[in-house]
Amino acid sequence: MQKGRLEAFSDGVLAIVITIMVLEIKVPHGDELSDLKPIIPVFLSYILSFIYLGIYWNNHHHLMHTVKEVSGGILWANLHLLFWLSLVPFVTGWMGKTILLR
């Protein structure tokens, strides 16, 4: 496998993860600025998770530039990383709702 395919697959998975995270932010009812107050914890957890994923994506990009050949071990290691990163939307939603309830 060429490293470009691995990088494209990983980019796609991270894009989907970020999309799922932003879809978890529900639009509040009302047209006043004060109507946004209840979703502030959810939005803050989204920002934190977005930065976290951005750091991983940036590091992954730089790592792929050092790879000359993709082996089976690299594929499994990459899938392992993507598995844990795919749980970020769940943790982001949980964190935003938990903070909201306190």
Image (tube, rainbow, N blue to C red):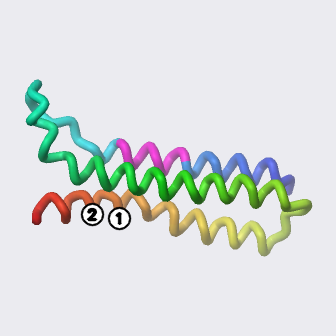
- What SS does tag 2 mark? helix
Task: From the viewer's side, name the closer residue of 61 and 82.
Answer: 61
Taking the view exactly as shown, the residue that stands out farthest to the bottom is 73
Left or right, residue 30 beside residue 17: left
Q: Which mark is residue 91?
A: 1
Q: Which mark is residue 82?
A: none
Q: Where is residue 62? Give x, y as percent.
A: 74, 55
User: Of the residues shown, which amino acid type is indicated by label 2?
Assistant: Trp
**Displayed quadrant of residue 100:** bottom left
Q: Where is residue 32? Give x, y as percent.
A: 9, 27
Q: Where is residue 76? Give x, y as percent.
A: 70, 71
Residue drawn 58% across the image and 63% down it: 82
Do tag 2 and tag 1 residues touch (Cβ < 8 Å)? yes
Residue drawn 30% across the image and 47% down it: 24
| Predominant SS along the magenta part | helix
95 in the magenta segment: no
Which image quarter is the C terminus in?
bottom left
**Real-space CA distance between mark 2 and mark 1, rounded to the nearest whole angstrom:** 5 Å
Left or right, residue 86 beside residue 93: right
Residue drawn 68% across the image and 58% down it: 60
Left or right, residue 8 beside residue 56: right
Q: Residues within 10 Å of mark 2 (few under 14, many from 20)?
A: some
User: Of the residues shown, which amino acid type is indicated by label 1?
Assistant: Val
- What SS does tag 1 mark? helix
Q: Where is residue 4? Give x, y as percent.
A: 80, 48
**Displayed quadrant of residue 31:** top left
Q: Is residue 71 above or below residue 57?
A: below
- The residue to which callout 2 is attached is 94
Give the magenta part as a residue range: 15-22
Residue drawn 38% across the image and 49% down it: 47
